[in-house]
Amino acid sequence: MVKTNKVNGADFAEFSGDNYKVYSQLLNCAVVHHKYGGGKVVNVVSRENEKHPPLIYVEFYNNEIRHYNPASFSDNFNEIDIPEYIYGSFRDWLDINIKKRNEEERVRVEREAEEERTREEAQKKEKILAGLREKIAPLALRYKIGINKFVDASGYTPLALIILKIEGNDHISRDEVVFLDKNRIYNLLADYFCKEYRRGCNGWDLVKAIKYLRDDGQPEKAIEMSFVVFGDLEIDGAILTTRGGAYRDIGKFAEAKSSAHEAIRIDPESYYPYNLLGAVCYQERNFTDGNKYFNRAIELGGDISSQRYEIRNIFKNSNNETRGEIIKYLEKDPEKYAWIKDFVDLNKGAP
């Protein structure tokens, strides 16, 4: 009598695959079906010619015969007696497969644990970020800045750290001022320098506060704050010039020129009020006087780029008639005003 060994049906089916020769070794071997109970293999039919897996016929103790393909054999039989002469090969395969399964299970458990840790960390991080967003939200609303500008995936942004310093009445660095200016966050800069001025009554802080109020579109408030005299010619001149710029912003050209002339009287070596007068004259279409003032600014150390900047802005915000007059006037001196070509090109694209 051939010695047999009991093995798991699913394991044996995986070991055998669709191999007819392996299944054919099961003839007369006992099997246990999970539903029909015990039986034995009475026939194995190869279907290689039809390119199908073999069929395994099992006769149960009630004399009923049923057939199974390898897949259904794997699903239905809990236990199989297999001959000793194939058990060795099966055992070697099973040992390797068990190690493989154990390794796969270990990897699966570690992966799931890592995924769980990642989820927990993400939840903790999101909870922290939500707290940061909640804390900074009133400031974002006050300064009309999107909350995402203050909080990103890493936490508080550089902008948030700056605004928290300002709210805490701390000083911010020159680099932080440059950062805010570069990003055009003028309302925050205006607020900061207003606080700095009130705290230390430094005239240059007032000049900066007025400047950033203008940049933020608050010329009336800038004018209101500018009626202060420090007795320092340079500071007082700068305040008057900045006030004149605010008057210019709201179209009060007479007041703008008056402020500029007063600044010149106080600090005649400053080129800033001359640039202001040049710009106002251009807006009044008095190009001759405008150029005189711009040229005087250059003589005092101003840069021609300031003149170009002012004329270009006036040009862009003027109607076609005024644009044409500016071009016609500057083209009288093509060598000096060679850069007027940029305006000519701009005018061609105007509606």
Image (cartoon, rainbow, N blue to C red):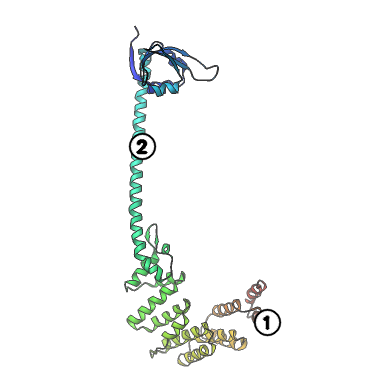
Q: To which residue does mark 1 refer?
A: 328
Residue at the spot 42% in from the left edge and 82% down from the top edge = 207
Label 2 crowd (10 A; few <14 / some 14-19 / many >=20)? few
Label 1 crowd (10 A; few <14 / some 14-19 / many >=20)? few
> In the rendered structure, which amino acid carries the disc numbered 1?
Lys
Residue at the spot 51% in from the left edge and 86% down from the top edge = 300
Q: Secondary structure at mark 1?
A: helix
Residue 175 appears at what percent x and percent y? 40, 70
In the image: residue 329, left or right of residue 107: right
Q: To which residue does mark 2 refer?
A: 108
Q: Nearer the viewer, residue 260 or 283?
A: 283
Q: Nearer the viewer, residue 18 or 181?
A: 18
The quarter in which the C terminus is drawn is: bottom right
Numbered label attached to residue 312: none
Residue 18 appears at what percent x and percent y? 46, 20
* Quadrant of the image occupied by residue 139: bottom left
Residue 155 appears at what percent x and percent y? 36, 59
In the image: residue 193, left or right of residue 310: left
* Quadrant of the image occupied by residue 165: bottom left
Q: Secondary structure at mark 2?
A: helix
Residue 218 appears at what percent x and percent y? 46, 79
Asked if the residue under mark 2 is in contact with the one under mark 1, i.e. CB atoms within 8 Å, the reply is no
* Quadrant of the image occupied by residue 67: top left
Toward the top, the furthest residue is: 1
> In the rendered structure, which amino acid carries the disc numbered 2?
Arg
Q: Nearer the viewer, residue 141 or 204?
A: 141
Q: Is residue 213 above or below residue 120?
A: below
Q: Nearer the viewer, residue 235 or 92?
A: 92
N-terminal of the pair, mark 1 or mark 2, is 2
In the image: residue 65, left or right of residue 251: left
